[in-house]
Amino acid sequence: MIEVSSLSKRYGNHLAVKNANFSIKKGEVVGFLGPNGAGKSTIMNILTGYLSLTQGKVEIDGFDIMTDPELAKKRIGYLPEIPPLYLDMTVREYLYFIYDLKKVKFPKEPHIDEIIRLVRIVEVEERLIKNLSKGYRQRVGIAAALVGNPDVLILDEPTVGLDPKQIIEIRDLITKLGRNHTIILSSHILSEVQAVCKRVIIINKGHIIADDTPENLSKALSSDHSLVARVIGKSEDVEAAINSVRNVYSIECLGEFEAGSKDYRIVPEGNADIRGELIKRLAEKNKLTLLSLTSNELTLEQIFLRLTGEDDMGVYFGNTDTAQEEQPEEISEITEESEEEN
């Protein structure tokens, strides 16, 4: 669906994106992460056709964003961090305006009605946008991105500034949209990315430094793959049940941290995932109760901090371009007047 090859972007003498390569298949929901100034938003704006590239190639569903921009852009719906809403229009008027702007061929009213129902803004469709809450404005922005039923949705910080309830609602909406659309989600809320994305791409200093599932990144970067189980029951019964699980290397009782239970540190052999069988074995013992099971592997937040740290950059990859030197002499001298976005 999306193919990015040898993508580079220069602003004056600054090379903001350096030889980026990645592909995204139809139906994938991908988290796009990077610290401020990493080149993340630059890549997203190139994908949408808002910025030109300096070198390389970007294809959307087989259409080159530079040579076939109209056909490529028809397949993209974009929600910027601050949706470009016309505040003096009603919600429905605004969506009609976007419909006409995109030259959509679907029957207008049924198409807009379907989108309004999908993003749950029926109750505010006749209200002026300037009178809507931040959460509803984000929903209107997503609705505008959906006009024309694009194959790809690019969402830049879709939950920024929202309260916890609104964040959950938008997250649920993104999950629902992911069933029928390819989605690229950029967010600084890493728990949100981990909740909705099956894959993450991390960029730092213009280089793509990670591209994998959060689970694979965690296993590859973690030195500690142990689990901590909090269990109610006699220690000898607990340890016997745990020892019956395949691929258990060692067990250590850590002591009592909650009345009536004890914590056990369980080390698997290699990267073996023993959670399912462990839970099953403990459940089979009538006198044992598993209160919690936690992993000591790195979280997505810890992975992000490690990979974007100066000392650890490029630790994970053997198949990316993180080790490449900048080669500005090979990139055509195209100076953009616009400033790099974060």
Image (cartoon, rainbow, N blue to C red):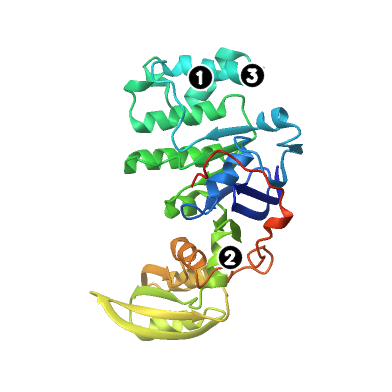
Residue 299 seen from this side: no
Q: Nearer the viewer, mark 1 or mark 2?
A: 1
Mark 1 falls on what kind of element?
A: helix
Q: Which residue is mark 1?
A: 95
> Which quadrant is home to the N terminus?
top right
Q: Amino acid at mark 2?
A: Asn
The amino acid pointed to by label 3 is Val
Q: Position of residue 36 (x, y in %)?
A: 46, 52
Q: Nearer the viewer, residue 104 or 290?
A: 104
Q: Nearer the viewer, mark 2 or mark 3?
A: 3
Q: Where 118 sits versus 177, above or below?
A: above
Q: Mark 2–mark 3 contact, CB under 8 Å?
A: no
Q: Residue at x 36, y 84 (%)?
A: 253
Residue at label 3?
Answer: 104
- Which image quarter: residue 59? top right
Compared with 252, 293 (above or below) is above
Task: Give the SS element for disc 2.
Answer: helix
- Badge 2: residue crowd in 10 Å (few <14, some 14–19, many ≥20): few
Asked whether 278 or 13 is in front, the reply is 13
Q: Residue at x 44, y 65 (%)?
A: 302
Q: Indicate the amino acid at tag 1.
A: Leu
Cα separation, mark 1 vs mark 3, equals: 11 Å
Q: Please give the residue where the numbered disc 2 appears in the rendered image.
A: 216
Q: CA distance from mark 1 to mark 2?
A: 41 Å
Q: Residue at x 39, y 82 (%)?
A: 237
| N-term mark: 1 or 3 | 1
